[in-house]
Image: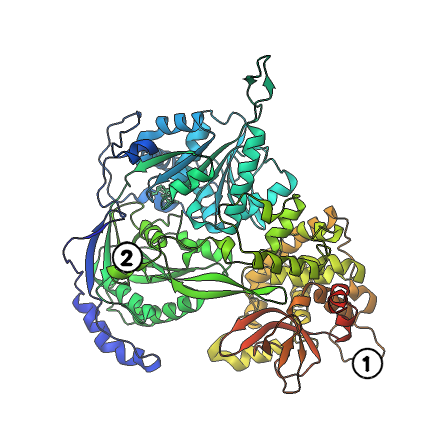
Amino acid sequence: MVVATAGRSTPKPGKSVVQLFRDKSQKYNQHKKRESKPMPWVDVSDEESGQKTGKNSLKRNGAMANGQSPNLPSNHRRKKPRHSHDTSSHAHNGVQEDATNGAGPSSLSKAAAIQEQRKDLPIAQGREALIEEIRKNDVTVLLGETGSGKTTQVPQYLLESGLVGNGMIAVTQPRRVAATSLAARVAQEQNAPLGQLVGYAVRFDEKSTSNTRIKYMTDGMIVRELLSDPMLSKYSVVVVDEAHERTLRTDLLLANLKKIIKKRNEPTKRDAKGKNNTTSSNPLKIVVMSATLDAEKFSKFFSGAKILYVKGRQHPVKIYHSAEHQMDYVDSAMRTFFQIHTDQPPGDVLIFLPGQEDIESLQASIELFARQLPVNSPNVLICSMFAAQDSRKNIQAFAPAPPNTRKCILATNIAETSITIPGVKYVIDTGKCKEKQFLARAGGGGLDTLLTKDITQSSAMQRTGRAGREGSGMCFRLYPESAFKAMQVSSEPEILRTSLTSSILQLKCLGQDMQDLDLMDKPDEESIISAFRTLWLLGSVDQKGSLTPAGRKMAAFPVDPMYACSIVASEGLQCTSEVIDIISVLSSSSKLFVDISDQRDAVAEQRRKFRHPSGDHMTILNVVRAYEEISASNGTTSANKNKAAKREWCRKHFLNERTLLEAQEIRNQLRTVCERENINWTVSALKKTAVVGGAKEDGVIHEEDSIIKALGHGLTGNAAFLQPDGTYKQIMGPSIVKIHPSSVLCDKKVAAIIYDELVFTNHIYARGVSSIPKSFFATHEPLKQRHA
Ligand SMILES: Nc1ncnc2c1ncn2[C@@H]1O[C@H](COP(=O)(O)OP(=O)(O)OP(=O)(O)O)[C@@H](O)[C@H]1O
């Protein structure tokens, strides 16, 4: 990639910015010393941004290789002059149902405008050629710039051309927010309610019917579908989008697709001379897509698949690099935001940060300064997007800003690929991300850690691509051009750096071994062995590595295998109802307890009400029950009043109601899986004992005994024994851990603990902790075998 410097054109900070920092920096500096200088920028026009609305074309690989790059024949249309910023699309945001189905004149003109927009996309000129190539080839690799129209248009072209007959088109995405928002957009383009012709499927949330023809789904969901339909027979085309991300699930999917296509596309009959004369009745087509893909590698993987290029992007994006490295990227992002806010024309701003903590810190800073803007300045509305946040809150970022307001979206890399956030004209890229890294442990198991790292060139280009979706855009990179050039081209495939436990279990159910799979990159032996040890400890595989009946049951649950193990174990311990309640909360995307630093005492007082002496898991259960009691006690009031009462109760007790609501949905799904697996989820420990968190009396059997044991079966790899110095030593690893300050057990000393996860700060802390009898481990079968 060539990045050419095209002179210096620094957006000059307006007076208001200088004034703002002079006046307020003292206050700001009180809690964090930060500079008040405006950001110096170097203007870079580069190839990756597609600077000009170039001639759009579709090209073939051979042609690119010999430099001739001829265009394929296409249904050339004269390109219409582009309308300036098209506000019509602002009306539709994220996952909204039926946004266009009104029959009024405005919805008709909106629908017409959307069709015009579709025709103006770079990919539209190569539409016929593209369909033809896909028709001719089993596997196609499609490379096209961000915003050229791949993700939204290719599935529609395939559907509209009749190429898929009555079959379905699956379009996979690495992230749920992309899957849901794309489905909403494409449903709107098809003028159909979301979930009908166009639907989506993400973990714990699906909107589709038997009439759905285009399904956007996470790569994890389609891999899970392999369990019930190993040939993916209901799909005629599988479009693997954003394949450059090389998520673990995408790699597993690609390996399986390679197998499936061989079987499904095999000719069914041969004539007397042994020649094929009948094509398969249900052939499969695969389209692998990305803007930043090592196309040759994917083509080679599929035995020389055809590579097609879509050239051009609809709108130019101007890139600015900071003149110097920025040590404090949160502060630099804030200053850049206010430079944009005071100097640049209207348009929303999308800021990429590595994680939630930085998002919250930047939000606080921007809010603080925004309050001090001159009275006639436009307002600032902050939205955030990160994986741990409730999906409904993430979707709020798609809603249009009110009049005279600039929206500022603070996001992690979940907003990096595929999505269009209407209104975004400016992107600020801190150049940082968090990446999962698995540390395999010699004794078995291991742990996933999240490390803050520099992004890759591929990520930088994707982030840039989020500006300029509806009109020209600007991208401010908070790192010099030299840093961009020094970045890795793309990230290491996830399969080489993440825990393989869950995937190996799923593969086992498919009768596959990871070692034997034809993967693009093979994981190292140590990670595979470590995953097997964990699975053996959970009882999902036996000592020979063969799947056990319990392991097959565990694989049916769409949660971490350790929690799936607890659910399966709860059956024998007669406490499935409670275990599911707890695991639903642990599996939801946001935290249950809200911590507000300036209300610490009030928070602690409220939390005490739910405190259970055995630890955090039973404390969660107490919250779930109390929340249900609130619902029941308001049973006779109107639905609205009931809702309001529950919301107020959660607010008063510093609880995240979204987590509880999401947990209810997860619980319903887990119950359904239990029914399929013949596990009676209604069996409850409470019904037998009727004691909740009360004082322990000798000889009384408490409900938590069986619940904690069931959890202990799943969390055996996350267990530690008390040492004389008050710390805990892992029973399956070398680490010394402390109980996290947020735990109800943090000031207690108990003989043995189980925990949900480890957190690294100045110490290794165990979070989500419960006390468990030490004797439990003496009776744990795999552990006994291990020590025998
Ligand atoms: N939700 C939306 N609202 C408004 N316009 C949209 C929306 N989704 C897509 N578009 C328009 O369609 C264009 C093409 O989007 P699409 O996602 O198909 O591009 P792409 O080539 O797949 O890009 P990327 O690689 O970045 O995902 C966008 O640039 C934008 O103009």
Question: Looking at the rendered structure, which numbered label has been put on residue 337?
Answer: none
Q: Residues within 10 Å of mark 2 (few under 14, many from 20)?
A: some
Residue located at (40% from left, 64% from top):
453
The quadrant in which residue 52 appears is top left
- Gap between marks 2 and 1, in whole Å? 67 Å
- Tell me if I can see residue 71 in this picture: yes
- Vertical order, 52 against 411 (above or below): above
Q: Amino acid at mark 2?
A: Lys
Residue 104: % across, % down: 40, 35
In the figure, is residue 314 to the left or right of 523? left
Taking the view exactly as shown, the residue that stands out farthest to the right is: 699
Q: Which residue was labeled with disc 2?
A: 485
Residue 706: % across, % down: 77, 67
245 vs 266, nearest the viewer? 266
Give the position of the C terminus as an image quadrant: bottom right
| Residue at mark 2: C-beta within 8 A of ligand 1 | no
29 vs 552, nearest the viewer? 552
Question: Looking at the rendered structure, which numbered label has been put on residue 697?
Answer: 1
Q: Amino acid at mark 1?
A: Glu
Helix, strand or loop under label 1: loop
288 vs 746, nearest the viewer? 288
The quadrant in which residue 272 appears is top right
Foreground: disc 2 or disc 1: 2
